[in-house]
Structures are given as C-alpha cells and as structure tokens.
Amino acid sequence: MSDQIFPEPTVGVFILNKAGELLLLKSHKWPGKYVVPGGHVELGERLEEAAIREAKEETGLDIFDLKFINFQQFIYDPSFWKKRHFIFFDFTCKTDSLKVELNDEAEDYVWVGLDASLRLMLDSYTRTSIEKIIEGNLS
C-alpha cells in the first residue's frame, strides 16, 4: 500500500537541443521505458521553477523557453516502480548544451528526433506529451 495521503504534483521536462532533438532517459523507476527528466514540486515552488530545478538536478542542463504542454493524471499505474498517485504537469523547453550529467535517477540517455522518439519504448504519458509537441498544441 502507498504511504501517500494526497496526489503528488510533478513536472515532466521535455528538453530540446538546438537540432530539435529530445532528451530521453532510461530509469529504473520506469522499467524498460524511455521517459523525460522530472519530479515533485516542492512546497512554495512554481511549476516552472520545479521544471528548471529538476532538469538541472537530473541532467546538469540549464533550460529556457518553457512552454506548458498538458497535465495528465497518473493513478496507481503499474508502469512506475512504486504505487503512487501523481498529477503530471509537462513542459517543453530548450537547452544550448549537449553535456548531460545524469544523477542516480537515470542509467542512460539518448538525444532523438521527435518523430523517431515515437518508435522507441516510451511510457504512455511521455508518448502522449511528445504527440502534443509534434502537433504544436502548446500553451
């Protein structure tokens, strides 16, 4: 059983480099799937601030030009390593660097074109947001 009392707001950060390639991570928390950097929103933190912080913590990258993609509800989905209830707030953004320095939350990464990313093993929430980016339906 989960120790959560309330759903946890989290951010997903869809980082694009100068070539328009997306950064995807392999993480033990999402077995067998590619995902994007992200994590919880701290108390008193704006969503955009959480996205900037999580990107830096997990990848070492500085990001800018954040645009909101969507929000998604994640309720005890077995694709995650723990039983959790999240509300994902996904953002696309840019970086000027290709120098990725992963923390211990990810084991590997790849830069890939948006269309090509859809041919990879993605978790369904990551796939939904990539499809929205490709459609250009951003706030």
Image (tube, rainbow, N blue to C red):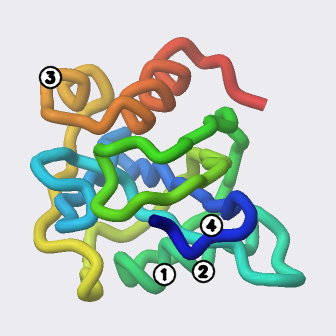
Q: What element does badge 1 sit on?
A: helix
* Residue that lies at the very extreme toward the right in this rendered image: 44
Location of residue 97 by image quarter: bottom left
Observer-nearest of 76 and 131? 76
Location of residue 27 by image quarter: bottom left
Observer-nearest of 8 and 59? 8
Q: What label sits on residue 56 in the rendered view?
A: 1
Q: Earlier in the sequence, mark 1 or mark 3?
A: 1
Mark 3 lies on residue: 119
In three-dimensional space, the C-alpha distance between marks 2 and 3, rounded to whole angstroms, equals: 29 Å
Contact between labelled residues 4 and 2, with CB atoms less than 8 Å apart: yes
Mark 2 lies on residue: 53
Position of 42 with respect to 115 (left or right) is right
Position of 120 with respect to 91 (left or right) is left
In three-dimensional space, the C-alpha distance between marks 1 and 4, rounded to whole angstroms, equals: 9 Å
Contact between labelled residues 1 and 2, with CB atoms less than 8 Å apart: yes
Mark 4 lies on residue: 51
Give the residue type at disc 3.
Arg
